[in-house]
Image: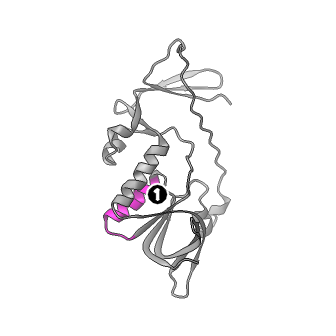
Amino acid sequence: MNPTLDFDAVVVGGGPAGATAADDLARQGVRVLLLDRAGRIKPCGGAIPPRLIQDFAIPDELLVARADAARMVSPQAVQVDIAIEGGFVGMVDREQFDEWLRERAAAHGAVRRTGRFVRLERDADGVCVLHYDGADGPAHVRTRAVIGADGARSQVAAQAVPGAERGRFVFAYHEVIALPEQVPAGYAAGRCEVHYNG
């Protein structure tokens, strides 16, 4: 097994929540490890309201589009148009955006590791030991705190929070569809549409 590394905190999950938590901790001088599984892009529309773009200093080059209107379409083709507060919603490509957040955390001092969370335990001193499968095989780190940012079906929560393993199931589907050369009648380039078609 690899030598034990000590951190003040370990964040499991490198999506927006985990990467931002690691970044905030690193900016405060906390020794933090950001542990994330490789090659996973989660289903997500990538919409970010203007307030969060400003609060999190997200650069314009990460915005792949700006939606200035939204339309929800029911399975019965009933359409509801929704005004967008703040004038627009920025749309990001999650693969690029999530990596940018992880890189920003590392630039502020977070240590990045690729690996899969395995289990938590306490050693004889009462210190939390986090075990994971890393690029070089099984590894573990001693830490004062663990933040489980590993999604709706969090394995960290399942082990650390009584009852969390009985959480609800979550299903998501994500598809990128190319716009046809001839756009349909009523098409608006700045409108985000969500179709609920069973």
- Give the residue furthest to the bottom: 124
Camera-nearest residue between 133 and 58: 133
For the stretch drawn in magenta, the main secondary structure is helix
Task: Where is residue 87? Give x, y as percent.
Answer: 35, 29
Residue annotated with mark 1: 18
Q: Residue at x 41, y 61 (%)?
A: 22
Say whether residue 153 is left or right of residue 100. Answer: right
Task: Where is residue 61? Give x, y as percent.
Answer: 35, 38
Magenta segment includes 114: no
Residue bounds of the magenta highlight:
17-31
Say whether residue 25 is left or right of residue 137. Answer: left
Q: Residue at x 62, y 29 (%)?
A: 196
Asked whether the viewer can see residue 140, the reply is yes
The amino acid type of the residue labelled 1 equals Gly
35 over 7 or under it: above or below: above
Task: Where is residue 107? Give x, y as percent.
Answer: 34, 59
Asked whether the viewer can see residue 130, the reply is no
User: Which quarter of the figure has residue 104?
Assistant: bottom left
Q: Residue at x 34, y 48 (%)?
A: 56
Task: Where is residue 177? Give x, y as percent.
Answer: 57, 28
